[in-house]
Image (spheres, rainbow, N blue to C red):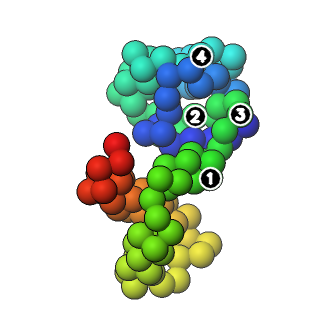
Amino acid sequence: MGVLNIDDLKGGMVLADDIFNKHGNILMKKGNTLSEQNIMPLKAWGVTEVNVEGVDQKQVDQEETQTLPAEVIDSIENELRLFFPHIEGDLIMEEIYRVIKKFRLKQAIIKQGIV
């Protein structure tokens, strides 16, 4: 089980918890399987994270970087450390760092023609 960012959800993932909107209404029930068609409405309802079975955010992030050479990943991380030197414990800055790192890694994957 793990909480994933809404942008990391993929069809076939199974919900580990119910998903609620900001008013407390259930959008999807635990045990339902996500499809590409029902992920977009979740975004529209403002859902940012979903608890799914069998995978967590760290695993998703690692899977994305497996196709990149270690020196490319190190270069991106070193570049970002210049802008984010002391973020440990600051949840907002840690999330901003994670999103920017993910974006830069995706750029590197596209640049290398891996996609």
Image point (65%, 44%), residue name: 56
| Position in image of residue 4 (x %, y %) | 57, 41
Q: What residue is rendered at 29% in x and 50% in y?
A: 113
Residue 93 falls left or right of residue 62:
left
Q: Which residue in the structure is indicated by mark 1?
A: 58
Q: Amino acid at mark 4?
A: Thr
Q: Position of residue 36 (x, y in %)?
A: 42, 20
Whole-Å distance between the Cαs marked 3 and 4? 12 Å
Q: 93 and 75: which one is in front?
A: 75
- Mark 3 residue type: Gly
Provide the residue designation for mark 2.
50
How many angstroms separate mark 1 from mark 3 (CA)?
12 Å
Q: Amino acid at mark 2?
A: Val
Q: CA distance from mark 2 to mark 3?
A: 12 Å
Whether 97 is drawn above or below 52: the answer is below
Q: Residues within 10 Å of mark 1 (few under 14, many from 20)?
A: few
Work out how far the residue at label 2 is from the one at label 1, CA to CA, in angstroms.
14 Å
Residue depicted at 38% across the width and 79% down the height: 79
Q: Which residue is label 3 attached to?
A: 54
Q: Give the quarter of the image for residue 30.
A: top right
Of the numbered discs 1 and 4, the one sitting upstream in the chain is 4
Name the residue beneath numbered marker 4: 33
Residue 52, given in percent of the width and then of the height, sits at 65, 31
Calculate the distance from the C-alpha at mark 4 to the C-alpha at mark 2: 12 Å
